[in-house]
Amino acid sequence: MRLPVSIWIGAALTTIFVIGALVSLVWTPFDVTDLDIQARMAPPGGAHLLGTDHLGRDILSMVMVGARTSIAVAIVAVVVGMVVGVPLGLHAAANRGGLIDDIIMRGNDLVLAFPPLVVAILITAVYGPSALNAILAIALINIPVFARVTRGGALSLWTLDYILAARVAGKGKIRISAEHILPNIANLLIVQGTISFSLGIIAEAGLSYVGLGAQPPVPSWGRMLAESQTLISLAPHMAVIPGLAIVFMVLGLNLMGDGLRDVLDPRLRRDR
Amino acid sequence: MLRYAATRLGSLVLSLWVASIVIFFTLEIVPGDPATFMLGLEASPESVDALRRELGLDEAPITRYLSWVTGMLIGDFGTSYTYRVPVGELIAARITVSLPLTLYAMALAAVIALPVGMIAAARRGTLADVAIMGVTQVGIALPNFWFAMLLVFFFAIGLGWFSAGGFPGWEAGLGAGLKALTLPALALGLTQAAIMSRVMRSSMLETLGQDYIRTARAKGLSHAQVTRRHAMRNALIPVMTIVGLQFSFLLANAIIIENVFFLPGLGRLIFQGITQRDLVVVESTVMLLVFTAITVNFLVDLAYAAIDPRLRRRG
Protein backbone atom coordinates (compact mmCIF):
# COMPACT_ATOMS: atom_id res chain seq x y z
CA MET A 1 0.00 0.00 0.00
CA ARG A 2 1.28 3.46 -0.88
CA LEU A 3 1.49 5.82 2.07
CA PRO A 4 0.02 9.30 1.58
CA VAL A 5 2.50 12.15 1.08
CA SER A 6 1.23 13.88 4.23
CA ILE A 7 2.63 11.06 6.40
CA TRP A 8 6.08 11.55 4.90
CA ILE A 9 6.01 15.32 5.34
CA GLY A 10 4.67 14.95 8.89
CA ALA A 11 7.20 12.29 9.80
CA ALA A 12 10.05 14.36 8.37
CA LEU A 13 9.05 17.44 10.38
CA THR A 14 8.61 15.42 13.56
CA THR A 15 11.92 13.61 13.06
CA ILE A 16 13.82 16.88 12.71
CA PHE A 17 12.56 18.02 16.12
CA VAL A 18 13.10 14.66 17.78
CA ILE A 19 16.68 14.54 16.46
CA GLY A 20 17.23 18.14 17.61
CA ALA A 21 15.94 17.25 21.06
CA LEU A 22 18.10 14.11 21.27
CA VAL A 23 21.23 15.89 20.04
CA SER A 24 20.66 18.61 22.65
CA LEU A 25 21.24 15.97 25.33
CA VAL A 26 24.91 15.74 24.33
CA TRP A 27 25.60 18.86 22.27
CA THR A 28 24.14 22.28 21.57
CA PRO A 29 25.84 25.02 19.50
CA PHE A 30 26.14 27.10 22.68
CA ASP A 31 25.44 26.43 26.34
CA VAL A 32 21.87 27.60 27.04
CA THR A 33 23.04 29.25 30.25
CA ASP A 34 25.82 31.14 28.45
CA LEU A 35 25.04 34.85 28.45
CA ASP A 36 26.76 36.54 25.52
CA ILE A 37 26.14 40.12 26.64
CA GLN A 38 28.01 41.62 23.69
CA ALA A 39 25.63 39.92 21.30
CA ARG A 40 22.28 40.62 22.96
CA MET A 41 19.26 40.33 20.66
CA ALA A 42 21.53 39.55 17.71
CA PRO A 43 19.47 38.84 14.58
CA PRO A 44 19.68 35.42 12.90
CA GLY A 45 22.80 34.70 10.89
CA GLY A 46 26.40 35.12 11.97
CA ALA A 47 27.90 33.24 14.88
CA HIS A 48 24.47 32.58 16.40
CA LEU A 49 22.60 30.89 13.55
CA LEU A 50 19.11 31.83 14.81
CA GLY A 51 20.23 34.89 16.73
CA THR A 52 20.26 35.52 20.47
CA ASP A 53 17.69 36.64 23.03
CA HIS A 54 17.64 39.65 25.36
CA LEU A 55 20.21 38.00 27.65
CA GLY A 56 22.46 36.96 24.78
CA ARG A 57 21.52 33.29 24.94
CA ASP A 58 21.74 31.32 21.70
CA ILE A 59 18.22 30.80 20.34
CA LEU A 60 19.00 27.68 18.29
CA SER A 61 20.33 25.98 21.41
CA MET A 62 17.28 27.07 23.40
CA VAL A 63 14.92 25.81 20.71
CA MET A 64 16.71 22.44 20.77
CA VAL A 65 16.50 22.12 24.55
CA GLY A 66 12.94 23.50 24.44
CA ALA A 67 12.03 20.72 22.01
CA ARG A 68 13.26 18.27 24.61
CA THR A 69 11.00 19.82 27.27
CA SER A 70 7.97 19.91 24.97
CA ILE A 71 8.41 16.38 23.66
CA ALA A 72 9.12 14.95 27.09
CA VAL A 73 6.07 16.59 28.67
CA ALA A 74 3.77 15.60 25.81
CA ILE A 75 5.01 12.00 25.54
CA VAL A 76 4.81 11.29 29.26
CA ALA A 77 1.33 12.85 29.35
CA VAL A 78 0.20 10.62 26.46
CA VAL A 79 1.73 7.51 28.02
CA VAL A 80 0.10 8.17 31.39
CA GLY A 81 -3.20 8.90 29.65
CA MET A 82 -2.95 5.57 27.79
CA VAL A 83 -1.77 3.47 30.71
CA VAL A 84 -4.68 4.64 32.86
CA GLY A 85 -7.32 5.35 30.22
CA VAL A 86 -7.05 2.23 28.06
CA PRO A 87 -7.66 -0.31 30.86
CA LEU A 88 -10.58 1.83 32.08
CA GLY A 89 -12.08 1.87 28.61
CA LEU A 90 -11.51 -1.88 28.13
CA HIS A 91 -13.12 -2.57 31.48
CA ALA A 92 -16.09 -0.33 30.73
CA ALA A 93 -16.65 -2.04 27.37
CA ALA A 94 -16.32 -5.56 28.79
CA ASN A 95 -18.92 -4.81 31.45
CA ARG A 96 -21.13 -2.67 29.30
CA GLY A 97 -24.07 -1.08 31.07
CA GLY A 98 -22.82 -2.21 34.48
CA LEU A 99 -22.24 -0.02 37.48
CA ILE A 100 -18.49 0.23 36.81
CA ASP A 101 -19.13 1.23 33.18
CA ASP A 102 -21.49 3.92 34.42
CA ILE A 103 -19.09 5.27 37.01
CA ILE A 104 -16.19 5.27 34.56
CA MET A 105 -18.16 7.05 31.86
CA ARG A 106 -19.71 9.61 34.23
CA GLY A 107 -16.27 10.28 35.70
CA ASN A 108 -15.03 10.79 32.15
CA ASP A 109 -17.81 13.24 31.41
CA LEU A 110 -16.92 15.14 34.53
CA VAL A 111 -13.23 15.50 33.67
CA LEU A 112 -14.14 16.42 30.09
CA ALA A 113 -16.50 19.10 31.42
CA PHE A 114 -13.56 20.94 32.95
CA PRO A 115 -11.93 23.06 30.25
CA PRO A 116 -8.34 21.69 29.97
CA LEU A 117 -6.80 25.00 30.86
CA VAL A 118 -8.91 25.18 34.01
CA VAL A 119 -7.67 21.72 35.07
CA ALA A 120 -4.11 22.90 34.57
CA ILE A 121 -4.76 26.06 36.55
CA LEU A 122 -6.29 24.11 39.43
CA ILE A 123 -3.39 21.65 39.55
CA THR A 124 -0.71 24.32 39.39
CA ALA A 125 -2.59 26.38 41.96
CA VAL A 126 -2.35 23.47 44.35
CA TYR A 127 1.09 22.05 43.65
CA GLY A 128 2.83 25.10 42.22
CA PRO A 129 4.02 25.60 38.65
CA SER A 130 6.53 23.07 37.29
CA ALA A 131 7.08 20.87 34.27
CA LEU A 132 6.01 17.87 36.33
CA ASN A 133 2.67 19.45 37.22
CA ALA A 134 2.15 20.47 33.61
CA ILE A 135 2.58 16.78 32.74
CA LEU A 136 0.11 15.83 35.45
CA ALA A 137 -2.47 18.32 34.17
CA ILE A 138 -2.16 17.24 30.53
CA ALA A 139 -2.16 13.55 31.49
CA LEU A 140 -5.31 14.00 33.53
CA ILE A 141 -7.06 15.40 30.48
CA ASN A 142 -5.76 12.55 28.31
CA ILE A 143 -7.15 9.81 30.56
CA PRO A 144 -10.85 10.26 29.66
CA VAL A 145 -9.95 10.81 26.03
CA PHE A 146 -8.21 7.43 25.81
CA ALA A 147 -10.86 5.72 27.93
CA ARG A 148 -13.53 6.95 25.56
CA VAL A 149 -11.72 5.98 22.36
CA THR A 150 -10.91 2.55 23.81
CA ARG A 151 -14.45 1.93 24.98
CA GLY A 152 -15.92 3.00 21.66
CA GLY A 153 -13.59 0.77 19.68
CA ALA A 154 -13.96 -2.17 22.06
CA LEU A 155 -17.77 -2.02 22.18
CA SER A 156 -18.08 -2.65 18.46
CA LEU A 157 -15.66 -5.60 18.70
CA TRP A 158 -17.52 -7.31 21.54
CA THR A 159 -20.46 -8.01 19.24
CA LEU A 160 -18.32 -9.90 16.70
CA ASP A 161 -18.38 -13.65 16.22
CA TYR A 162 -14.75 -14.34 16.99
CA ILE A 163 -15.15 -12.77 20.42
CA LEU A 164 -18.16 -14.97 20.99
CA ALA A 165 -16.01 -17.94 19.95
CA ALA A 166 -13.37 -16.92 22.46
CA ARG A 167 -15.99 -16.69 25.19
CA VAL A 168 -17.37 -20.11 24.29
CA ALA A 169 -13.81 -21.44 24.47
CA GLY A 170 -13.87 -20.34 28.10
CA LYS A 171 -11.67 -17.26 28.05
CA GLY A 172 -12.45 -14.65 30.69
CA LYS A 173 -13.26 -11.02 29.97
CA ILE A 174 -9.85 -9.77 31.01
CA ARG A 175 -8.04 -12.28 28.79
CA ILE A 176 -10.28 -11.49 25.84
CA SER A 177 -9.75 -7.77 26.35
CA ALA A 178 -5.98 -8.21 26.43
CA GLU A 179 -5.59 -10.84 23.72
CA HIS A 180 -8.31 -10.02 21.20
CA ILE A 181 -9.68 -6.54 21.79
CA LEU A 182 -6.51 -4.59 22.49
CA PRO A 183 -4.58 -5.68 19.37
CA ASN A 184 -7.58 -4.79 17.23
CA ILE A 185 -7.99 -1.29 18.58
CA ALA A 186 -4.26 -0.55 18.47
CA ASN A 187 -4.85 1.42 15.25
CA LEU A 188 -7.29 3.74 16.95
CA LEU A 189 -4.93 4.22 19.86
CA ILE A 190 -1.96 5.03 17.64
CA VAL A 191 -3.97 7.69 15.82
CA GLN A 192 -5.33 9.14 19.07
CA GLY A 193 -1.85 9.02 20.56
CA THR A 194 -0.48 11.16 17.71
CA ILE A 195 -3.31 13.67 18.08
CA SER A 196 -2.95 13.85 21.85
CA PHE A 197 0.80 14.24 21.42
CA SER A 198 0.30 17.33 19.27
CA LEU A 199 -2.34 18.74 21.62
CA GLY A 200 0.11 18.14 24.47
CA ILE A 201 2.78 20.20 22.71
CA ILE A 202 0.37 23.12 22.32
CA ALA A 203 -0.88 22.75 25.90
CA GLU A 204 2.65 22.68 27.30
CA ALA A 205 3.54 25.80 25.34
CA GLY A 206 0.41 27.58 26.57
CA LEU A 207 1.03 26.62 30.18
CA SER A 208 4.65 27.69 30.21
CA TYR A 209 3.65 30.88 28.39
CA VAL A 210 1.44 31.92 31.31
CA GLY A 211 4.10 30.77 33.75
CA LEU A 212 2.45 27.52 34.84
CA GLY A 213 4.82 25.12 33.06
CA ALA A 214 8.57 24.47 33.12
CA GLN A 215 10.34 26.99 35.33
CA PRO A 216 13.64 28.78 34.67
CA PRO A 217 16.36 27.86 33.92
CA VAL A 218 14.82 24.98 31.93
CA PRO A 219 14.23 26.48 28.47
CA SER A 220 10.75 25.96 27.04
CA TRP A 221 9.13 27.29 23.90
CA GLY A 222 6.21 28.86 25.74
CA ARG A 223 8.41 30.82 28.10
CA MET A 224 10.68 31.95 25.27
CA LEU A 225 7.55 33.46 23.72
CA ALA A 226 6.50 35.07 26.99
CA GLU A 227 9.94 36.66 27.39
CA SER A 228 9.91 37.92 23.81
CA GLN A 229 6.52 39.59 24.10
CA THR A 230 7.61 43.02 25.29
CA LEU A 231 10.64 42.99 22.98
CA ILE A 232 8.77 41.99 19.84
CA SER A 233 9.36 45.28 18.03
CA LEU A 234 13.08 45.34 18.95
CA ALA A 235 13.83 41.70 18.22
CA PRO A 236 11.01 40.05 16.25
CA HIS A 237 13.10 36.90 15.71
CA MET A 238 12.84 36.16 19.45
CA ALA A 239 9.08 35.75 19.03
CA VAL A 240 9.00 34.30 15.54
CA ILE A 241 11.46 31.42 15.94
CA PRO A 242 10.02 29.59 18.98
CA GLY A 243 6.52 30.12 17.56
CA LEU A 244 7.51 28.57 14.25
CA ALA A 245 9.06 25.68 16.15
CA ILE A 246 5.71 24.99 17.83
CA VAL A 247 3.79 25.32 14.56
CA PHE A 248 6.09 22.98 12.61
CA MET A 249 6.21 20.39 15.37
CA VAL A 250 2.42 20.37 15.79
CA LEU A 251 1.85 20.49 12.04
CA GLY A 252 4.16 17.51 11.59
CA LEU A 253 2.32 15.47 14.20
CA ASN A 254 -1.11 16.42 12.84
CA LEU A 255 -0.16 15.55 9.27
CA MET A 256 1.19 12.23 10.50
CA GLY A 257 -1.94 11.59 12.58
CA ASP A 258 -4.31 12.39 9.71
CA GLY A 259 -2.28 10.29 7.30
CA LEU A 260 -2.12 7.35 9.72
CA ARG A 261 -5.86 7.56 10.25
CA ASP A 262 -6.45 7.33 6.52
CA VAL A 263 -4.21 4.29 6.26
CA LEU A 264 -5.24 2.50 9.45
CA ASP A 265 -8.96 3.24 9.43
CA PRO A 266 -10.30 2.59 5.93
CA ARG A 267 -13.82 3.53 6.99
CA LEU A 268 -12.83 7.18 7.05
CA ARG A 269 -11.07 7.12 3.72
CA ARG A 270 -14.15 7.81 1.63
CA ASP A 271 -14.28 11.28 3.16
CA ARG A 272 -11.21 12.34 1.33
CA MET B 1 -38.60 14.56 24.66
CA LEU B 2 -39.65 15.70 28.14
CA ARG B 3 -38.38 12.51 29.71
CA TYR B 4 -35.12 12.84 27.88
CA ALA B 5 -34.77 16.45 29.05
CA ALA B 6 -35.52 15.44 32.64
CA THR B 7 -32.86 12.70 32.67
CA ARG B 8 -30.30 15.00 31.14
CA LEU B 9 -31.21 17.72 33.64
CA GLY B 10 -30.70 15.23 36.46
CA SER B 11 -27.22 14.36 35.24
CA LEU B 12 -26.49 18.07 34.75
CA VAL B 13 -27.25 18.79 38.39
CA LEU B 14 -25.22 15.76 39.48
CA SER B 15 -22.21 16.86 37.39
CA LEU B 16 -22.37 20.36 38.80
CA TRP B 17 -22.54 19.04 42.33
CA VAL B 18 -19.56 16.72 41.89
CA ALA B 19 -17.65 19.49 40.13
CA SER B 20 -18.25 21.83 43.07
CA ILE B 21 -16.89 19.22 45.47
CA VAL B 22 -13.81 18.61 43.31
CA ILE B 23 -13.08 22.32 42.96
CA PHE B 24 -13.60 23.19 46.61
CA PHE B 25 -11.61 20.37 48.11
CA THR B 26 -8.82 20.64 45.52
CA LEU B 27 -8.26 24.24 46.52
CA GLU B 28 -8.67 23.32 50.17
CA ILE B 29 -5.28 21.56 50.04
CA VAL B 30 -3.49 24.55 48.53
CA PRO B 31 -0.48 25.13 50.76
CA GLY B 32 -0.38 28.51 52.47
CA ASP B 33 -2.97 30.00 54.75
CA PRO B 34 -4.71 32.99 53.10
CA ALA B 35 -4.78 34.98 56.34
CA THR B 36 -1.04 34.54 56.96
CA PHE B 37 -0.40 35.34 53.32
CA MET B 38 -2.40 38.56 53.49
CA LEU B 39 -0.84 39.86 56.68
CA GLY B 40 2.72 38.88 55.89
CA LEU B 41 5.12 36.72 57.86
CA GLU B 42 5.70 39.23 60.66
CA ALA B 43 2.04 39.42 61.68
CA SER B 44 1.22 38.47 65.23
CA PRO B 45 -0.63 35.18 65.76
CA GLU B 46 -3.51 37.12 67.35
CA SER B 47 -4.14 39.31 64.32
CA VAL B 48 -3.88 36.28 62.01
CA ASP B 49 -6.43 34.49 64.18
CA ALA B 50 -8.70 37.52 64.12
CA LEU B 51 -8.53 37.72 60.34
CA ARG B 52 -9.14 33.98 60.03
CA ARG B 53 -12.30 34.42 62.09
CA GLU B 54 -13.37 37.40 60.05
CA LEU B 55 -12.90 35.50 56.79
CA GLY B 56 -14.64 32.46 58.25
CA LEU B 57 -11.51 30.33 57.85
CA ASP B 58 -11.75 29.01 61.41
CA GLU B 59 -14.78 26.91 60.53
CA ALA B 60 -14.59 23.29 59.42
CA PRO B 61 -14.06 22.79 55.66
CA ILE B 62 -17.41 21.04 55.32
CA THR B 63 -19.23 24.03 56.86
CA ARG B 64 -17.45 26.40 54.55
CA TYR B 65 -18.21 24.16 51.56
CA LEU B 66 -21.91 24.13 52.41
CA SER B 67 -22.11 27.89 52.87
CA TRP B 68 -20.20 28.39 49.60
CA VAL B 69 -22.56 26.14 47.64
CA THR B 70 -25.78 27.39 49.21
CA GLY B 71 -24.52 30.95 48.75
CA MET B 72 -23.93 30.36 45.04
CA LEU B 73 -27.46 29.04 44.64
CA ILE B 74 -28.81 32.43 45.67
CA GLY B 75 -26.15 34.32 43.72
CA ASP B 76 -23.80 35.03 46.62
CA PHE B 77 -20.27 33.99 45.65
CA GLY B 78 -18.65 35.00 48.92
CA THR B 79 -16.33 37.90 49.70
CA SER B 80 -12.90 38.26 48.15
CA TYR B 81 -10.08 38.01 50.71
CA THR B 82 -7.95 40.67 49.06
CA TYR B 83 -10.45 43.08 47.53
CA ARG B 84 -12.93 42.82 50.44
CA VAL B 85 -15.83 43.11 48.01
CA PRO B 86 -18.34 40.44 46.99
CA VAL B 87 -16.82 38.03 44.45
CA GLY B 88 -20.03 38.31 42.48
CA GLU B 89 -19.27 41.98 41.80
CA LEU B 90 -15.73 41.18 40.70
CA ILE B 91 -16.96 38.47 38.36
CA ALA B 92 -19.75 40.64 37.00
CA ALA B 93 -17.27 43.40 36.17
CA ARG B 94 -14.83 41.01 34.48
CA ILE B 95 -17.40 39.04 32.56
CA THR B 96 -18.37 42.15 30.60
CA VAL B 97 -14.97 41.71 28.96
CA SER B 98 -14.61 37.91 28.75
CA LEU B 99 -18.10 37.11 27.48
CA PRO B 100 -18.22 39.69 24.66
CA LEU B 101 -14.71 38.60 23.67
CA THR B 102 -15.80 34.95 23.47
CA LEU B 103 -18.97 35.73 21.53
CA TYR B 104 -17.08 38.05 19.19
CA ALA B 105 -14.50 35.33 18.54
CA MET B 106 -17.23 32.75 17.92
CA ALA B 107 -19.08 35.02 15.53
CA LEU B 108 -15.87 35.65 13.60
CA ALA B 109 -15.11 31.94 13.51
CA ALA B 110 -18.59 31.03 12.26
CA VAL B 111 -18.75 33.79 9.65
CA ILE B 112 -15.44 32.65 8.20
CA ALA B 113 -15.62 28.90 8.71
CA LEU B 114 -19.08 28.01 7.44
CA PRO B 115 -18.72 29.49 3.94
CA VAL B 116 -15.10 28.33 3.67
CA GLY B 117 -16.05 24.78 4.65
CA MET B 118 -18.91 24.73 2.16
CA ILE B 119 -16.74 26.06 -0.65
CA ALA B 120 -14.13 23.40 0.08
CA ALA B 121 -16.81 20.69 0.04
CA ALA B 122 -18.41 21.99 -3.15
CA ARG B 123 -15.04 22.16 -4.92
CA ARG B 124 -13.77 18.93 -3.45
CA GLY B 125 -10.45 17.83 -4.90
CA THR B 126 -9.79 21.10 -6.72
CA LEU B 127 -6.90 23.43 -6.06
CA ALA B 128 -9.19 25.64 -3.94
CA ASP B 129 -10.06 22.69 -1.70
CA VAL B 130 -6.42 21.64 -1.32
CA ALA B 131 -5.42 25.22 -0.52
CA ILE B 132 -8.19 25.64 2.07
CA MET B 133 -7.32 22.35 3.72
CA GLY B 134 -3.65 23.32 3.81
CA VAL B 135 -4.37 26.68 5.41
CA THR B 136 -6.68 25.14 8.01
CA GLN B 137 -4.04 22.52 8.82
CA VAL B 138 -1.62 25.33 9.64
CA GLY B 139 -4.38 27.17 11.53
CA ILE B 140 -4.88 24.19 13.81
CA ALA B 141 -1.17 24.05 14.54
CA LEU B 142 -1.01 27.74 15.50
CA PRO B 143 -0.96 28.34 19.25
CA ASN B 144 -3.46 31.18 19.62
CA PHE B 145 -1.35 33.21 22.03
CA TRP B 146 1.49 33.24 19.51
CA PHE B 147 -0.90 34.21 16.75
CA ALA B 148 -2.08 36.99 19.08
CA MET B 149 1.49 38.24 19.46
CA LEU B 150 1.94 38.30 15.68
CA LEU B 151 -1.32 40.22 15.28
CA VAL B 152 -0.10 42.79 17.79
CA PHE B 153 3.21 43.03 15.95
CA PHE B 154 1.63 43.63 12.54
CA PHE B 155 -1.59 45.49 13.23
CA ALA B 156 -0.85 47.36 16.45
CA ILE B 157 2.89 48.06 16.44
CA GLY B 158 3.44 47.95 12.68
CA LEU B 159 0.35 49.49 11.12
CA GLY B 160 -1.00 51.20 14.22
CA TRP B 161 -4.60 50.25 13.40
CA PHE B 162 -5.33 48.95 16.89
CA SER B 163 -3.86 49.46 20.32
CA ALA B 164 -1.54 46.70 21.52
CA GLY B 165 -3.58 45.95 24.61
CA GLY B 166 -5.76 47.25 27.39
CA PHE B 167 -9.46 47.90 27.44
CA PRO B 168 -11.08 51.36 27.60
CA GLY B 169 -14.28 50.00 29.15
CA TRP B 170 -17.72 50.00 27.63
CA GLU B 171 -18.29 53.53 28.96
CA ALA B 172 -15.96 54.69 26.18
CA GLY B 173 -18.59 53.59 23.70
CA LEU B 174 -19.49 50.40 21.88
CA GLY B 175 -17.17 51.17 18.99
CA ALA B 176 -14.12 51.74 21.17
CA GLY B 177 -14.86 48.61 23.21
CA LEU B 178 -15.27 46.43 20.14
CA LYS B 179 -12.14 47.89 18.59
CA ALA B 180 -10.11 46.94 21.65
CA LEU B 181 -11.51 43.41 21.47
CA THR B 182 -10.96 42.96 17.73
CA LEU B 183 -7.39 41.66 17.77
CA PRO B 184 -8.00 39.34 20.74
CA ALA B 185 -11.15 38.02 19.07
CA LEU B 186 -9.28 37.45 15.81
CA ALA B 187 -6.55 35.56 17.66
CA LEU B 188 -9.09 33.36 19.40
CA GLY B 189 -11.53 33.05 16.51
CA LEU B 190 -9.30 32.38 13.51
CA THR B 191 -7.64 29.33 15.02
CA GLN B 192 -11.11 28.02 15.91
CA ALA B 193 -12.31 28.80 12.40
CA ALA B 194 -9.68 26.39 11.09
CA ILE B 195 -11.20 23.51 13.05
CA MET B 196 -14.76 24.57 12.33
CA SER B 197 -14.29 24.80 8.58
CA ARG B 198 -12.83 21.29 8.47
CA VAL B 199 -15.84 19.98 10.37
CA MET B 200 -18.18 21.89 8.08
CA ARG B 201 -16.45 20.48 5.01
CA SER B 202 -16.55 16.84 6.07
CA SER B 203 -20.11 17.17 7.36
CA MET B 204 -21.19 18.69 4.04
CA LEU B 205 -19.42 15.93 2.08
CA GLU B 206 -21.06 13.30 4.25
CA THR B 207 -24.50 14.83 3.69
CA LEU B 208 -24.03 15.25 -0.05
CA GLY B 209 -23.35 11.51 -0.28
CA GLN B 210 -26.71 10.58 1.25
CA ASP B 211 -29.50 8.89 -0.71
CA TYR B 212 -32.03 11.66 -0.07
CA ILE B 213 -29.75 14.12 -1.80
CA ARG B 214 -29.65 11.87 -4.85
CA THR B 215 -33.45 11.60 -4.67
CA ALA B 216 -33.79 15.36 -4.54
CA ARG B 217 -31.54 15.68 -7.55
CA ALA B 218 -33.46 12.93 -9.35
CA LYS B 219 -36.77 14.69 -8.86
CA GLY B 220 -35.36 17.62 -10.77
CA LEU B 221 -34.11 20.11 -8.16
CA SER B 222 -31.10 22.12 -9.26
CA HIS B 223 -27.77 21.63 -7.59
CA ALA B 224 -28.07 24.98 -5.81
CA GLN B 225 -31.55 24.18 -4.53
CA VAL B 226 -30.44 20.81 -3.18
CA THR B 227 -27.47 22.34 -1.47
CA ARG B 228 -29.48 25.11 0.12
CA ARG B 229 -32.66 23.30 1.02
CA HIS B 230 -31.46 19.81 1.89
CA ALA B 231 -27.72 19.49 2.31
CA MET B 232 -26.85 22.66 4.20
CA ARG B 233 -29.42 22.24 6.95
CA ASN B 234 -28.48 18.67 7.68
CA ALA B 235 -24.78 19.38 7.47
CA LEU B 236 -25.13 22.11 10.09
CA ILE B 237 -26.21 19.66 12.83
CA PRO B 238 -22.76 18.23 13.66
CA VAL B 239 -21.28 21.69 13.22
CA MET B 240 -23.66 22.99 15.87
CA THR B 241 -22.29 20.49 18.39
CA ILE B 242 -18.77 21.65 17.70
CA VAL B 243 -19.84 25.28 18.08
CA GLY B 244 -21.35 24.45 21.47
CA LEU B 245 -18.22 22.66 22.62
CA GLN B 246 -16.07 25.47 21.30
CA PHE B 247 -17.93 28.07 23.32
CA SER B 248 -16.66 26.80 26.65
CA PHE B 249 -13.27 26.05 25.11
CA LEU B 250 -13.04 29.64 23.86
CA LEU B 251 -14.14 31.07 27.18
CA ALA B 252 -11.36 29.14 28.92
CA ASN B 253 -8.79 30.00 26.27
CA ALA B 254 -9.75 33.63 26.52
CA ILE B 255 -7.87 33.41 29.84
CA ILE B 256 -4.56 33.15 27.98
CA ILE B 257 -5.47 35.66 25.28
CA GLU B 258 -6.50 38.19 27.94
CA ASN B 259 -2.99 37.80 29.28
CA VAL B 260 -1.47 38.75 25.92
CA PHE B 261 -3.61 41.86 25.55
CA PHE B 262 -3.71 42.91 29.22
CA LEU B 263 -7.50 42.72 29.22
CA PRO B 264 -9.26 42.96 32.60
CA GLY B 265 -11.26 39.75 32.16
CA LEU B 266 -11.90 36.56 34.13
CA GLY B 267 -8.43 35.25 33.23
CA ARG B 268 -6.65 38.07 35.01
CA LEU B 269 -8.99 37.59 37.96
CA ILE B 270 -8.07 33.89 38.25
CA PHE B 271 -4.32 34.46 37.95
CA GLN B 272 -4.37 37.26 40.50
CA GLY B 273 -6.47 35.10 42.77
CA ILE B 274 -3.91 32.30 42.60
CA THR B 275 -0.89 34.48 43.26
CA GLN B 276 -2.62 36.28 46.13
CA ARG B 277 -4.11 33.11 47.62
CA ASP B 278 -7.56 34.63 47.17
CA LEU B 279 -9.15 31.20 47.10
CA VAL B 280 -12.78 32.34 47.13
CA VAL B 281 -12.20 34.21 43.89
CA VAL B 282 -10.45 31.24 42.25
CA GLU B 283 -13.09 28.77 43.42
CA SER B 284 -16.04 30.81 42.26
CA THR B 285 -14.52 31.81 38.92
CA VAL B 286 -13.46 28.25 38.12
CA MET B 287 -16.90 27.01 39.15
CA LEU B 288 -18.46 29.56 36.82
CA LEU B 289 -16.32 28.35 33.89
CA VAL B 290 -17.19 24.72 34.61
CA PHE B 291 -20.85 25.62 35.06
CA THR B 292 -20.82 27.31 31.66
CA ALA B 293 -19.14 24.34 30.00
CA ILE B 294 -21.55 21.80 31.51
CA THR B 295 -24.64 23.91 30.84
CA VAL B 296 -23.71 24.66 27.25
CA ASN B 297 -23.14 20.95 26.59
CA PHE B 298 -26.52 20.25 28.11
CA LEU B 299 -28.23 22.84 25.91
CA VAL B 300 -26.47 21.51 22.82
CA ASP B 301 -27.63 17.98 23.67
CA LEU B 302 -31.20 19.22 24.07
CA ALA B 303 -31.13 21.18 20.84
CA TYR B 304 -29.65 18.14 19.14
CA ALA B 305 -32.40 15.88 20.45
CA ALA B 306 -35.07 18.38 19.45
CA ILE B 307 -33.78 18.32 15.87
CA ASP B 308 -32.97 14.62 15.64
CA PRO B 309 -35.47 12.40 17.50
CA ARG B 310 -33.25 9.31 17.06
CA LEU B 311 -30.89 10.69 19.69
CA ARG B 312 -33.50 10.81 22.45
CA ARG B 313 -33.24 7.09 23.05
CA ARG B 314 -29.70 7.38 24.39
CA GLY B 315 -29.92 8.36 28.04
Image (cartoon, coloured by chain):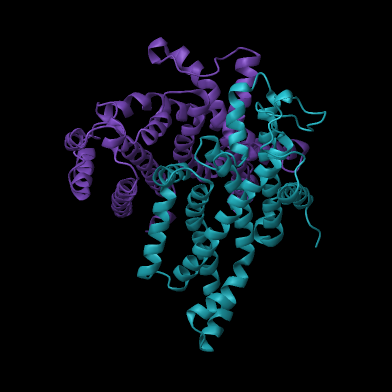
Chain colours: A cyan, B purple
Q: Residue at x 35, y 45 (%)?
A: B31
Q: Residue at x 62, y 72 (%)?
A: A183
What is the x, y in percent for residue A69? 62, 47
Residue sitting nearer the eye, B274 or A152? B274
Q: Residue furthest top?
A: B172
The reply, left or right, for residue A105 in relation to residue A187 is left
Front residue of B67/A221: it is A221
* Picture quarter with the C terminus of chain B: bottom left
Identity of the residue drawn at 33% across and 45% down: B27
Query: Picture coordinates of residue A113 (x, y %)?
Result: 41, 48
| Residue A188 picture location, percent across and down | 61, 62
Along the viewing direction, whichever of B118 and A27 lies nearer the viewer: A27
Q: Is residue B184 visible?
A: yes
Nearer to me, B292 or A221: A221
- Residue shown at the point (81%, 31%) measured from the top left: A47
Above or below, A162 against A126 in this view is below
Q: Position of residue B305 (x, y in %)?
A: 40, 49
How many circles with numbers are drawn on the protein?
0
Q: Quadrant of residue A97?
A: bottom left
